[in-house]
Amino acid sequence: MSSNYLNERLLEPNHKTDLLGLASVWRQCTINLVLEGMAGFAHSPSLLNKVRGSFGRVLVERGSQFVRDRKPCQWNPVCGAEVFFARKPIVKIGPYSSEITKPYILRVSSDQKNLVISLGMFGVAGEWRREVEACLIEALQSRVRWKNLAKDVTETVPDFVRVLSSVNTSIDSLEISSPPLETRISFLTPVDAERGVFIEQPYLIFERLMRRIYMMARWHFLELDQSWEEMSKMWRGCEYCFEASTMSKFVIGGHKFSNRITSGHALKISGNLDKLWPLLVFGQATNVGRGANVGLGHFCIS
């Protein structure tokens, strides 16, 4: 798959589908890496931002000379850096024009002792999982500046970052259950608030999800055929009730996110959720908002 072919398929898919059709062919591959004795780093707010940067540098170094020269990759198939970090075509979604989002997310979790770094890939991006796994392991072992991150969480960095195990999981579809009359969204990580705050305009969660899922459909070589105007009327007609919410900038240990974030809130939504419900189901898999690739906007629904 050449760079030109990839971009052409992203920009002009051969087929259209609605949200339920996308769910039936949804592909998602996730790499889960367990790092020995480093559970405390899960609380570093800058962790995934630094992991993404280190991972990107390794991908570029292992990629083609064209990519290292900031040009489209000429390999066939293209190198991973072209898929996960190169600029992508711009598409129009409702009233907005946006660059097609990168087809992955990073997440972090831990048990009592070990740190777990997960990287999920969507659609065709999963075909690069072997390259991604090798580059992510190298990034975690030798590129992430763990000593700097340790300042955020008062942790001791081991002499050698050891990956205990690597487990790959995959799904080939998403199950969309019957929509409820009311749902509760619990945010597990902060949400980017630079372009509108959910607590002031709660319907923005659907607007952002619609844009994100529209772009993820492109990574399945599909165009999402769902009326923005119709969906907008539905999400603006819902009732929203927020629980506690705060706004801040993370500035800890010399690291910071450049955008404002909101954290610590949950949102109850009631109304006609028939066509909106799939967006929330997809959102659990993809996160929502800017910064979704580095773990922001992770939520669950109940």
Image (cartoon, rainbow, N blue to C red):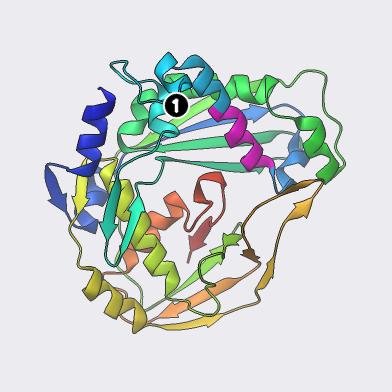
Q: What predominant SS class does the magenta segment belong to?
A: helix
| Number of residues whose C-alpha sits closer than 10 Å to that of mark 1, classed few (under 14), some (14–19) or many (20 or more) | few
Q: Which residues are magenta?
A: 47-56
Residue 41, image x, y percentages: 75, 40
Taking 110 as reference, is 137 left or right? left
* Residue 148 appearing in the image: yes
Identify the image quadrant of residue 269.
Answer: bottom left
Identify the image quadrant of residue 229.
Answer: bottom left
Residue at image point 37% right, 82% down: 238
* Residue 175 appearing in the image: no
Q: Which residue is mark 1?
A: 70
Residue at image point 22% right, 40% down: 221
Identify the image quadrant of residue 111.
Answer: top right
Q: Relative to 118, is 210 above or below?
A: below
Taking 164 as reference, is 18 left or right? left
Q: Is residue 117 magenta?
A: no
Residue at image point 49% right, 77% down: 268
Residue 51, image x, y percentages: 62, 34
Q: Relative to 253, is 38 above or below?
A: above
Taking 226 as reference, is 208 left or right? right
Work out which quarter of the rendered image holds the N terminus and state it: top left
Q: Relative to 45, is 278 above or below?
A: below
Residue at image point 45% right, 17% down: 63
Taking 67 as reference, is 166 left or right? right
Q: In the depicted view, which residue is nearer to us: 169 or 129? A: 129
Asked which secondary structure carries label 1, the reply is loop
Amino acid type of disc 1?
Arg
